[in-house]
Amino acid sequence: VQLQASGGGLVQPGGSLRLSCAASGRIFGYYVLAWYRQSPGAERELVATITSGGVPNYEEAAKGRFTISRDSTLNTVSLQMNSLKPEDTAVYYCSYNGVYWGQGTLVTVSS
């Protein structure tokens, strides 16, 4: 499975950004797509997950601000991020079953 993430960039505090991740390869059955992030000097942390059945789950930092979604026909997973804060600054990674990883896309929240 190969993952290609996109959509990162520079945004002001309070702004929005949408990340996308396209998956290709042998994708079938039950699976979990996820977004993780890693800030400078910190460990990689889970942001949100969504199952092949479309059930989302969010870590505390993402609740109420981020929305994860997936398009099963296109094999893509997206992360809509609203009300962004400087502490959301990180490299965001998409993952398939926690085994396959995208290359990461940098999100910088700064004025």
Image (spheres, rainbow, N blue to C red):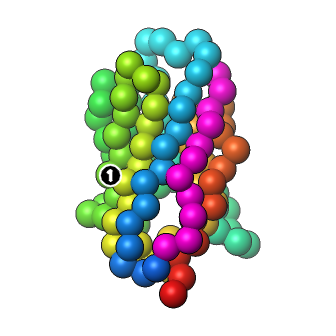
Residue at the location (70% across, 71% down)? 40
Question: Residue 70 versus residue 54: which sits nearer the camera?
Answer: 70
Q: Say whether residue 75 is left or right of residue 83.
A: right
Residue 7: in magenta span: yes
* Mark 1 surroundings within 10 Å by alpha-carbon count, few (fewer than 14), some (14 through 19), many (20 or more): some
Residue at 38% across, 60% down: 81
* Residue lying furthest bottom: 111
Give the residue pinned by disc 1: 67
Look at 59% across and 21% down and name the residue there: 24
- Locate residue 78: give its quadrant: top left
Please check the rendered image and state whether residue 86 is part of the magenta-colored stretch, yes or no.
Answer: no
Which corner quadrant of the image does residue 72 belong to? top left
Residue at 36%, 46% in the rendered image: 68
Picture coordinates of residue 8, whole percent (x, y): 56, 58
**At label 1, which amino acid type do we have?**
Thr
Percent x, y for residue 110? 54, 82
Task: Decide: is 54 above or below 80.
Answer: above
Q: Confirm whether residue 84 shows in the render.
A: yes
Direction from residue 43 to residue 50 in the image, left or right = left
Q: Nearer the viewer, residue 17 or 100?
A: 17
Question: Taken as a whole, is the magenta stretch helix, strand or loop?
Answer: strand
Q: Quadrant of the N terminus?
A: top right
Q: Taking 47 as reference, is 98 left or right?
A: right
The residue nearer to you, when weighing 34 against 85, is 85
Segment tinted magenta in the rendering: 1-11
Q: Position of residue 53 (x, y in %)?
A: 31, 24
Tag 1 secondary structure: strand
